[in-house]
Structures are given as structure tokens and as C-alpha cells.
Amino acid sequence: MKQQTRYSHFLKTLVVLGDYIVLNITFLFVLFIFKSYLREDVLFQFYKLLAVLNICYIPSLFTFNIDIHSRVIYADKIVQNIFYIILFHFLLFTAALSFLKIEEVSRLFIISFYSILFFSLACWRLSFRFSIKLYRKKGFNYKLVTIIGAGKNGNSLYEEMMNDSGYGFRILGFFEDNPVNIPIDSKWLGSTDDIETFLHENEVDEVYCTLPESAEKTIVRTLNFCENNMIRFYIVPEFRRYVKKQMELDVLGNMPVLSLRDEPLQYPLNQLIKRGFDITFSFLFLCTLFPVIYIVVAICIKTSSPGPILFKQRRTGERAHEFYCFKFRTMKVNKDADTTQAIIHDPRTTRLGEFLRKSSIDELPQIINVLKGEMSFVGPRPHMLKHTEQYNELIDKYMLRHLVKPGITGWAQVNGYRGETKELSQMEGRVARDVWYLEHWSFFLDIKIIYLTIINIFRGDKNAY
């Protein structure tokens, strides 16, 4: 039996079994805590409650199914899936209680149960995912893979597969008519004429074809052979170098049509969720902690150097609209502030400014921009107008990053692309991650980025200067 089917059913069953154990233990735990507060008739209907609880979980799992054992799946997607499962279960469970006329269960009990359940399920599933990756790193539950074509496509695919041993790919080698292009640490299996012979004589789970469209005969021949021999066949198109997201296939009449970019924040519901989060937490912060922080920092700034407390600068926002971005002033007043980036050991930066930058406290006034709707908590960092004009001429697709609101922090920043950009490649890397963010946005991705930002602040970021 092939590797891809050998453990999949067992792992799926294990996840579902673990979910049910967590569900019931959490329910019993919360019931035990609230035992003295619940009426006796509620406890009397304990078995009915337990049965309804478990039955309602079945459609929740089927509706929001996710394969945690998949080779590549990210933690924020797992947490997001858990949120949807719990929300759906909550709706079903409360509807069932109303239908069965079990109305004595308190709202506090329900809120406590689902809050603890969310945390418990997240811990269980993330731990399970971590265990699977660790198991694969030890050399188990792998997939035997061959790659056809060792051009840029093939080499890039090889690097991605080898990037994390937790994916569990065991690459047997390449089929390539020009062996010179094969990575040094891989193996040449033969020319494209040898594919069928090798696949027939060896166990292979998946074949990845990276050949150009001009090699249509080889592609079709190999595809048909794989289909007839129960081998998974994947095509890696050449234009994947320009498109970094999973695309959607549609059909126009009899013609297949690929949608190159589906931006989640194009949809009104997602916009509402993101804006709702921004308004709620920016308002709460500005009404509670910010006044205290502002008074303390303002006194320190005024006593350390002459000039205003806040530094405001015109920057490029959503749809290339300009806005004034606020920061606590960290430099001496200078004429180059709007044209020259801060560098390490910048003579313009005050001693207090160094601390404010290192701790990211200087960014806090941008929460005012968030409340005004000019920025978001998470998004591509807004650039100076000069840099927008400069990099737009040098970097392809640079302006795509302005399809969403700029953020106080972003995907590029938590991946090491923060601060000064000494080389063009650094800005290209930042832009690539900004575009990735707008193509893969989810509420839980924002939460993940905020979490990583906080971790980096306490850990210390070498690029924060």
C-alpha cells in the first residue's frame, strides 16, 4: 500500500477521537466547577446534555474538516478551523437545548465551557501536529517523491520540500535530460525517457512535473502512466514564479480559467471583521493605557531634546492615498527626516529615542491612525513618499502592497524584514511578504502576527534601531 494512504485514515481517526476526549473532559471539568451553582434538575439531565453535546459535534467536524496530518499546514489555519468548529457547535448545541426545553443552563456556564474548549482543542491539535512533524523528522510516515525537470522550477520545488524535514518528503531524485542542472545533494534517475521504467520498478508515491508547456508529450505520457498505476501526479506551472498563492480554477464554457489572485480582504465580511477588531482595541487602548504612556513619554522627550512630542510624516496608505503617520519623536529635529532612513547608530537619534525604538514604544501613537481608519494593527508597513516613488520604479508589483491598509506591524516585520533596507534585495523580500499577506489574510493570521510581534519585542529585535 502506498505511503500516502498507509496512515491517513488512522491519523484522522486519532484526531477525531482526541477531539471527543477533549470535548467531554472539558464539559465534565466545567460542570464540576459550576456544580454548586447549577440547579438539581440540570444535573438530573446530565446524560441528556452529554448526549446532545457529542451528537452536535459530528456535523461540526464534517462541516469544517481539516487534515492536520497534511504535509504542509500552518498553525494559524488550525486555530482558525477550531474557531469555526466551536462557533458552529455552539449554534447547534444552544439550538438543541432550546428545542429540548433545557433552559436552566446558565450563560456563564456556556461561555466558560466554550472558552476553555477553544483553548483545550487548540492545545490538543497543535500538539498533535507538532508530534506528527517530529515523527516525520525521525524518518517515519514519509512520501517517496520524484521530480521531473531540474530547471528553476524543479530546483525551487526541491528547496521547498527539503526546507523542513517535518513535511516528510523523501526525494528519490530527478528525471532530467541535462543532468548538470540537478542539485548537488540530489540524485539523477535518468532522462525523461526513463520515467515509466523507473516508476514501474520502484515504489513511488508522488511525481512532481516541473517541465515547461513545450514538453507536452512527455507531460501527457507521464500523467497517463501515473493515473493508470495509482501514483499521484502534480504539475508545477512555470508561472508559479510570479504567483505565490494557491489559485482557483473556474470554467468558462469548456475553457479552464485560473484566477491568479483572490484577496480575502476584498470581501465585505472580512473587512468588517478586521475593521471591527481595529476599532475595538484601538479605542480601548487610547482610553486606558495610552494617556498614561503619553504623559510619561512626553515628559521624557521634552526634557531630552527640544522639539515636538509627536513626529508626523506623510506616508503612502491604502490605494496610494497619502496620510500623516504619527510616532513619538526619537530624533533631534532635522531637515532630512522625510528623505533619509534611520540607520544603525544614527547620530540624529537621541538616547531616549534609541530606547523607544528598541522597545517599539515609538510606534504606539499610530494607534490613533488605526482608529481614524488610515492604518490597521496588522498590514504592510507604510513607507515614506520618496521611498514609494523610488521602489515602485525598481521593484515589480511593488504597488500591490497598497491594496490593503498599512499596519503597525506586519508579516514582513515578524519574518526579519524590519528597519533599514541597505540593499534592494531586502526591500524585495519585504514586498514579497507583504503581497503574501494580502493573498493569505485571515483573522487568525493577524492574531499570529501580533503574538509574534510581542514576542520579538521582549526577545529584542536586532533591526529595531
Image: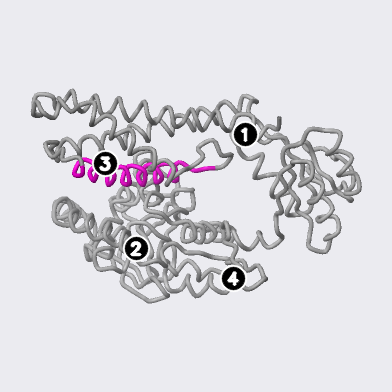
Q: Residue at x 79, y 41 (%)?
A: 229
Query: Disc 4 marks which residue?
Result: 394
Q: Is residue 308 above or below residue 447?
A: below
Choose the circle earlier in sequence order: 2 or 1. 1
Query: Disc 1 marks which residue?
Result: 165
Q: Nearer the viewer, mark 2 or mark 1?
A: 2
Local SS, label 3:
helix
Q: Is residue 328 visible?
A: no
Q: Residue at x 53, y 70 (%)?
A: 391
Local SS, label 2:
helix
Query: Mark 3 and mark 4 in contact (Cβ < 8 Å)?
Result: no
Q: Nearer the viewer, mark 4 or mark 1?
A: 1
Q: Is residue 98 visible?
A: yes
Query: Disc 2 marks which residue?
Result: 269
Q: Residues within 10 Å of mark 3 (few under 14, many from 20)?
A: many
User: Disc 3 marks which amino acid?
Assistant: Phe
Choose the circle earlier in sequence order: 4 or 1. 1
